[in-house]
Amino acid sequence: MESMFIIILISIIRLSVPVIFTGLGNMFCEKAGVMNLGAEGMMIAGAFGAALGAYLTGNAWIGVIVGILCGMLVALIHALISVEFGGLQNISGLGLNALAGGLTAFFCRFFFGSGKSPIVDSIQSVPFLAGVPVIGKFLAQFSPLMYLLILLYVVSWYVVKKTVYGLRITAVGDDPKTVETAGIDVWRLRTTCVAVCGALAGLAGAYLSIGHLNIFVENMTMGKGMLAVIAVKMGRWDPKRIVAIAAMFSFFDALQLQLQMYNTGLPVEILQMIPFIVGVLAIAFSKNSISAPRQLNKPYVKNKFTM
């Protein structure tokens, strides 16, 4: 019983990392007033970029950097459409999901000749932590990206809750016109937040391909970006709540993986739906949040023709 508990605990931690990375990124994006349904596209771009970077250079950390840049590239396209041009934010995000998914599949076959990459250099563990008394072996089996996530969570919480910059982000999401009147560049701030979202989603993708595994496979994100979107909504744009909701989804994800190991008689596809069913039900029965940014999903277009 104790070993099963440890196995599930390890699975929850590992599976929650990409959802939390992307959830924190989406929090910044949406608190600034930009709806982002394109998290899945940013994540899959990061996963492919990380695997390709590690494959070409033989260095997993360079792969992580490439993954971050790929996630940011998709995010900046979203910012161009949604922030600069005032396009429909939902349509932009969903379109980028399809675009990124298609491009990564195309380039995967272009570079590797199939729908998956060769085995690449990865960072799935931290061996030096094995020397820590009592819990060293437990700590050593997690990717260093998981420990980076802990640091970025603390930084994100501090920025949002304790800094003037975080206050400005919240103000831009609530009342951009007043913020502009105060002399703050609304479009630069929103674009920066979207770019941060892309960087964190790219990190999530890098974790999937070279932090959790050592290979890229087409569509390997499997809806984790959308789970992150739901976690942000249910978590009311609060870092602590987002982590809690992501952990809940990861518990059910770990549960369905364990159920696949037993002869339940259910098709694998049905079992894989469990965390998403939980997410849909959670959204359906949750109350409307009054903490949502008031200008979320409402473009604020710069008047470039004013004399």
Image (cartoon, grey):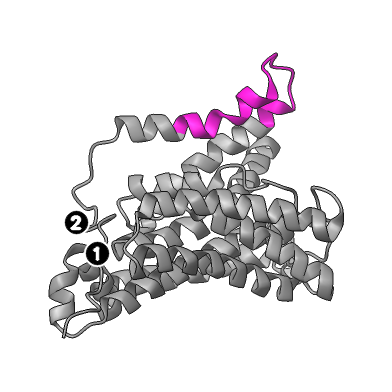
Which residue extends farthest top? Answer: 265
Q: Is residue 154 left or right of residue 217?
A: left
Q: Are marks 2 and 1 in contact (CB under 8 Å)?
A: yes
- Give the quadrant of residue 288: top left
| Other residues around mark 1 within 10 Å, as few (<14) / some (14–19) / many (≥20) | many
Q: Is residue 90 left or right of residue 60?
A: left
* Location of residue 108 in the rendering, given as x and y in whole percent from the top left corner: 77, 56
Q: Which residues are magenta?
A: 258-278
163 or 126: nearer the eye? 163
- Give the quadrant of residue 119: bottom right
- Give the quadrant of residue 303: bottom left
Disc 1 residue type?
Gly
Q: Secondary structure at mark 1?
A: helix
Compared with 114, 270 (above or below) is: above
Tell me, for residue 173, which label it has, or none.
Answer: 1
Q: Secondary structure at mark 2?
A: loop
Question: Which badge, 2 or 1, is on the more N-terminal residue?
Answer: 1
Q: Is residue 253 left or right of residue 183?
A: right
Q: Name which residue lies at 44% across and 35% down.
A: 279
The secondary structure that most of the magenta stretch takes on is: helix
250 or 272: nearer the eye? 272
Q: Which residue, given by chain and number where applicable, does mark 2 sit on? A: 294
Residue 168 appears in the rendering = yes
The verdict on residue 268 being magenta is yes
